[in-house]
Image (cartoon, grey):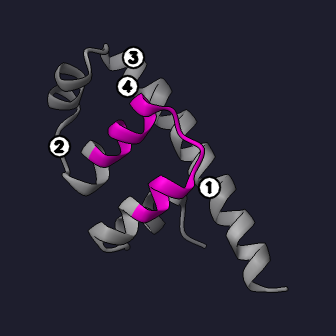
Amino acid sequence: MLSTRQYIRNLERYQMRKLFDMCDLEEDEKWLLIYAFVEKRLRENTCDKLGISSRQYHYLLNIALVKVETKLKELDKIRYL
């Protein structure tokens, strides 16, 4: 079983963006995921871009990944109905 991060990394860029749009993410969480996974920016660059600290980066990333994982599980249930 792949972790959420591994699953996201295996997607194409347009698939990542579609997935992030489908999730109930706050604006900062969405951009954090886009910068981290789609654009593959470094943490420091993303922190500067969003105006957050490194600690906030990890906190928001974990929250966003939980929301993505929840959406993936929801979609997986629909697929197997």
Residue at 39% across / 16% down in the picture? 55
Residue at 31% across / 48% down in the picture? 34
- What separation in Å lies between label 4 and label 2 (alpha carbons)? 13 Å
In the rendered image, the vertical position of residue 76 relative to residue 47, given as above or below: below
- What separation in Å lies between label 1 and label 4 (alpha carbons)? 18 Å
Q: State yes or no: residue 33 in magenta.
A: yes
Q: Between disc 1 and disc 2, whose residue precedes?
A: 2
- Look at label 3 and name its amino acid: Arg
Residue 17 — which label?
none
Query: Residue 65: percent from the left, percent from the top?
Result: 53, 45
Q: Between disc 1 and disc 3, whose residue precedes?
A: 3
- Look at label 4 and name its amino acid: Tyr
Q: Between disc 4 and disc 2, whose residue precedes?
A: 2
The quadrant the N terminus occupies is bottom right
Which residue matches tag 3? 55
- What separation in Å lies between label 1 and label 3 (alpha carbons)? 21 Å
Magenta region, residue range: 18-34
- What separation in Å lies between label 1 and label 2 (alpha carbons)? 21 Å
Task: Tell me the mark number nearer the camera, choosing from 1 and 3.
Answer: 1
- Look at label 1 and name its amino acid: Glu
Residue at 48% across / 62% down in the picture? 19
In the rendered image, the vertical position of residue 6 relative to residue 69, given as above or below: below
Which residue matches tag 1? 69
Q: Main secondary structure of the magenta part?
A: helix
Side (left or right) of 7 relative to 42? right
In the rendered image, the vertical position of residue 47 relative to residue 9, given as above or below: above
The quadrant the C terminus occupies is bottom right
Q: Are discs 3 and 4 less than 8 Å apart at CB?
A: yes
Which residue matches tag 4? 57
Which residue matches tag 2? 41
